[in-house]
Amino acid sequence: MFDYSITENCLSNKTILVTGAGAGIGREAALSYAKLGATVILLGKTVSKLEAVYDEIIALKLADPAIVPLDLKGATKQNYIDMAATIVSQFGKLDGVLLNASMLGELTPFAQIHEQIFNDVMQVNVTAQYLLAQALIPALQLADNASLVFTSSGVGNQGRAYWGAYSISKFATEGLMQVIADEYENSSLRVNAINPGATKTNMRASAYPAENKDKLATPADIMPLYVYLMSDDSLTVNGKTLKAQ
């Protein structure tokens, strides 16, 4: 695992938005950030899942989180602009954004990729990420130091048979991250990506249904990198894709 010693309250007074916060890695990241002192904004498409994470944070007597129900497949540019304006009015700034939500689509031979599935994967994994970043960067620039984190994959830098739309989308994600990182290199905003590796999540299970899940890292196991990139210890890291495992 990524070698980083997490210190108590290392995210105090930070406001961090997490997409896909209702389950899996997003849920674990949101809980971890809250436990370390951050105010967390939970974004996802399933309200009941977001509410469960909200309730868990409240039960721990941590900073009150916020919920943003939003489906990245159907959301518009204006939805993201309005959300960013609300965040600034309520919180004053954003210290961090974890763009974690992704769509797997189907694992299929390239010649058989369905156009609608390809478009849906690109919408969620690329277009929504670009629109979110574009809308949220002004809020991130209001912080003394801010971190924007994308989610990549092992198939995002080396193409793999049958991973078509998802693999292509993650290549695009890495390019998107690198473009933004280069533009903001000499600013208070740092931009990076995480490759979580093989992790025990529902998405992984749908891709590898016969796999022995007990041998996989859990979302909690890979949190050191997720915390590191949101903490002030990573202030000089920019334009990198880092492996959580």
Image: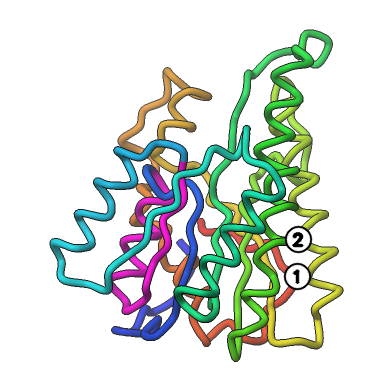
| Label placed on residue 214 | none
Residue 172 at x, y = what percent? 80, 46
Q: What stretch is highlighted in magenta?
A: 24-44
Give left or right: position of 218 versus 43.
Answer: left
Residue 39 inside the magenta-drawn segment: yes
Residue at position x 38%, y 84% in the image: 10
| Residue drawn where x is 76% and y is 60% of the image | 177
Compute the Cα span from label 1 to label 2.
7 Å
Q: Earlier in the sequence, mark 1 or mark 2?
A: 2
Mark 2 crowdedness (10 Å alpha carbons): few <14, some 14-19, many ≥20: many
Q: Which amino acid does label 1 sit on?
A: Gly
Q: Quadrant of residue 154?
A: top right
Nearer mark to the viewer, of 1 and 2: 2
Mark 1 surroundings within 10 Å by alpha-carbon count, few (fewer than 14), some (14 through 19), many (20 or more): many
Check disc 2 and give the amino acid type: Met
Residue lying farthest to the top in this orientation: 112
Which percent across, then down, holds residue 192? 67, 67
Q: Position of residue 101 (x, y in %)?
A: 54, 45
Whether residue 233 is in magenta: the answer is no
Does 200 sit left or right of 59 as displayed? right
Residue on which the image places disc 2:
177
Q: What element carries label 1?
A: loop
Position above or below: 122 against 137: above
* Residue named by callout 1: 239
Helix, strand or loop status at disc 2? helix
Q: Is residue 171 left or right of residue 120?
A: right
| Quarter of the image with the N terminus in it | bottom left
Q: In terms of depth relative to the viewer, which is nearer, 10 or 154?
A: 10
Q: In this view, does 151 lie above or below 208?
A: below
- Relative image position of residue 14 (x, y in whole percent): 44, 80
Q: Do the residues labelled 1 and 2 touch (CB within 8 Å)?
A: yes
